[in-house]
Image (cartoon, helix red, strand yellow):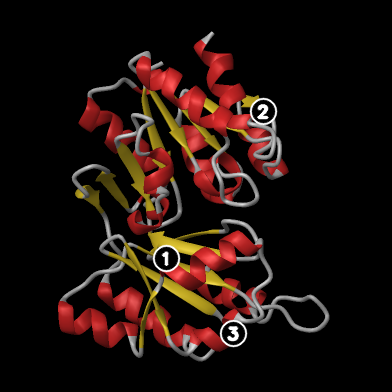
Amino acid sequence: MKLIALDLDGTLFNNKSQISRENIKAIKEATAAGINVVISTGRPFGGLPFEAIKDTGIRYAITANGSAIYEIDTKKCLYENCLSDETAFSIIDYLMTKRVHMDAFINGCGYSPYKCLEDAKDLKMPPSIKEYIMTTRKRVNDITEMMRENNYHMQKMTINFPKDADDNYYCRDEVFEHLKKIPEITLVSGGYGNLEFTKAGVDKGVALHKLTQLLNIAADETMAVGDTENDMAIVKAAHIGVAMGNATDELKAQADYVTDTNENDGVAKAIRHFMG
C-alpha cells in the first residue's frame, strides 16, 4: 500500500471536529513507513485542519469533492476542474430565491452571500460543523458579480438547508429535483441534509486517479476511507475501500471493509489493519 486517502467530517474527525491522538499516531506510523496519507474532503483547501496535521507527514489534499488537488505546504494547486461559469451563475441565481445557506468554493476558499446569514440560524447540524461554516466563509453581496469581476471560477458548491418548526428541511426536495435535471453537474449529499455539486464527471474517485498519476502510484496500491455519499466514488475507486462504522448503509455495502466509528478511532484501526 502506497497511498491512503482519508475523508475529514465523520471520518478522521470525531463529532467535535477533532482528530484523536490515536488517529494522529496511526497516520504518523503510516507516513513513517513510506505511505502517502492524503486528505480527501468536500471542504475547500482553506477548510483543512492545518494545525492538527502539520507534523503528521500529510502532504497532499483532494479538496472540494475532487475538483482540486493541493500540495499542502506550498498551497500550490496541482489540479483543478471547475464548473462552467454559465452553469454556476444559473444555479446561484436560482438558489438566491430559496431558503438555503450556500457556499461557493473558489480558489480554495468558501464564499457565501450575506443573504444566507439569516437562514444559517436555523441550520441543524453538529455545533462544530456549524461553527466552521459560520466562521470560515468570506461573505459577499453577490457571488456571481464577484466571480465576473475577478474572473474567478467555482470548484464546488455546498448547500445546507435550514429546518422548520416541525424539523423538516426547507425546500431540500424541491432543490434536489431541480439540480438533478442539470447534466452539467455531479450532485451528491455530504450528510446533515445537505446537497453538494461539482462539474459533471468530477468526484473524489477521479481525483484519486489523478493524484496517483502525479505521484507515480499504481491503482492497486491505494486505500480510501469515508462515511457518506460524497465518499462513494473514492471508496469504489481505491483498491481497498473502507467505510466507517458510522457510514451510510449504501457506502458500507460498497466497501471492502467496515471499520469502527469516528468516535472510536475507526481511521487508526483501519490503517493498522491493512498495514499488518
Hey, which quadrant is residue 173 in on the image?
bottom right
Q: What residue is drawn where x is 37% and y is 50%?
A: 63
Q: CA distance from mark 1 to mark 2?
A: 33 Å
Q: What residue is drawn where x is 58% and y is 36%?
A: 20
Q: Which residue is mark 2?
A: 258
- Going from N to C along the chain, the mark reached first, 2 or 3, is 3
Rendered position, 146 above or below 51: below
Q: Nearer the viewer, residue 139 or 170?
A: 139
Q: What residue is drawn where x is 30% and y is 60%?
A: 108
Residue 79 coordinates in the image, percent (x, y): 22, 47
Hey, which quadrant is residue 218 in on the image?
top left
- Which amino acid type is shown beneath numbered disc 2? Val
Look at the image and tell me whether residue 15 can be seen.
Answer: yes
| Secondary element at image label 3 | helix
Tag shown at residue 183: 1
Q: Which residue is mark 3?
A: 119
